[in-house]
Image (cartoon, rainbow, N blue to C red):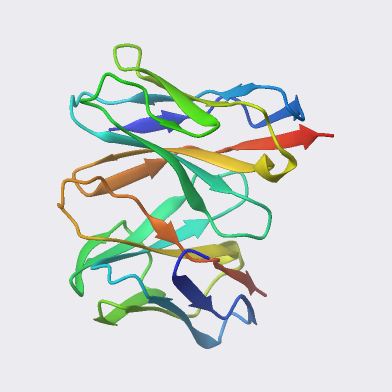
């Protein structure tokens, strides 16, 4: 069965600095999708970034980028130039064959 | 806003009550989902509807009863709940199952449920 592990329950980063959130997953499949979702306090969960497993190039969205290591089954999220609005719970998710599995999340604090 | 709305936003109910949660999406999506989010636990997928047909039921107790009258609306009927059912219930939608574009989920704000 597939699993998604986020080993950092909480992290803090100074405003304007860079932070990396880790995610590992377990699957025997070769074709799947990976996501990072952000859930700000009392606000809706939104997609941050998406990666197709068949693509070797790491996805990027403005200040957000991923380090996708398929062989190691690792999918970390890097946030550059952290801003106060980045404070949120971040969830890593795996999707394949109509099934989506989320990690437990990492709470990110931004220090002014 | 993601185009997915949920009502009510907060709900307190006794164990003998019957209530319903409502979800509406304005995105033209064909797949809709119910999730349960409890503290310190991963997001749990409860039900999936694809073109109004239920395609997934992740061993959810029968005290939770979903209904999808059309592709834009999704309900979760609640009856005889237990205190451990207290959680944030999230609704989500996605464009189309099996579209090959990856299941990007668009989430609603959730209903915070407290069962006394």
The number of numbered discs placed on residues in the rendered structure image is: 0
* Spot occupied by residue A108 in the image (x, y as percentages of width and height): 68, 35
Question: Up-down: is A63 above or below B20?
Answer: above
Question: Up-down: is A19 above or below B8?
Answer: above
Question: Up-down: is B20 above or below A55?
Answer: below
Residue toward you, A105 or A40: A40
| Residue displayed at 55% across by 87% down | B17
* Spot occupied by residue B43 in the image (x, y as percentages of width and height): 47, 49
* Spot occupied by residue B16 in the image (x, y as percentages of width and height): 56, 85
Relative horizontal placement of residue A82, taking residue A71 as reference (left or right): right
Relative horizontal placement of residue A90, taking residue A17 as reference (left or right): left
Q: Quadrant of the C terminus of chain B?
A: bottom right
| Residue displayed at 37% across by 32% down | A3
Residue at the right extreme of this rendering: A112
| Residue displayed at 74% across by 41% down | A84
Name the quadrant containing residue B71.
bottom left
| Residue displayed at 34% across by 50% down | B104
* Spot occupied by residue A44 in the image (x, y as percentages of width and height): 56, 59
Residue at the front extreme of this rendering: A62
Residue toward you, A19 or A101: A19
Residue at the top extreme of this rendering: A71
């Amino acid at each position: 069965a597939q699993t998604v592990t986020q080993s950092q329950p909480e992290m803090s980063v100074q405003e304007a600095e860079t932070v990396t959130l880790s995610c590992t997953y377990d699957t025997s499949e070769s074709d799947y999708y990976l996501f990072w979702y952000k859930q700000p306090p009392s606000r809706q969960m939104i997609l941050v970034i998406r990666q197709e497993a068949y693509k070797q190039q790491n996805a990027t969205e403005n200040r957000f980028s991923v380090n996708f290591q398929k062989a190691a089954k690792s999918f970390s999220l890097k946030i550059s130039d952290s801003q106060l609005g980045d404070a949120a719970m971040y969830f890593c998710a795996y999707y394949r064959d109509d099934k989506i599995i989320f990690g437990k999340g990492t709470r990110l604090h931004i220090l002014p | 806003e993601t185009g997915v709305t949920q009502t009510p936003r907060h709900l307190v109910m006794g164990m003998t009550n019957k209530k319903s949660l409502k979800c509406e999406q304005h995105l033209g999506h064909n797949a809709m989902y119910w999730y349960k989010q409890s503290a310190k636990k991963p997001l749990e997928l409860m039900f999936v509807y694809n073109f109004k047909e239920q395609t997934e039921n992740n061993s959810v107790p029968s005290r939770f009863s979903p209904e999808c009258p059309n592709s834009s609306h999704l309900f979760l009927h609640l009856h005889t709940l237990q205190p451990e059912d207290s959680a944030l219930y999230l609704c989500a939608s996605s464009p189309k199952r099996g579209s090959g574009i990856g299941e990007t989920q668009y989430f609603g704000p959730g209903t915070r449920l407290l069962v006394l």
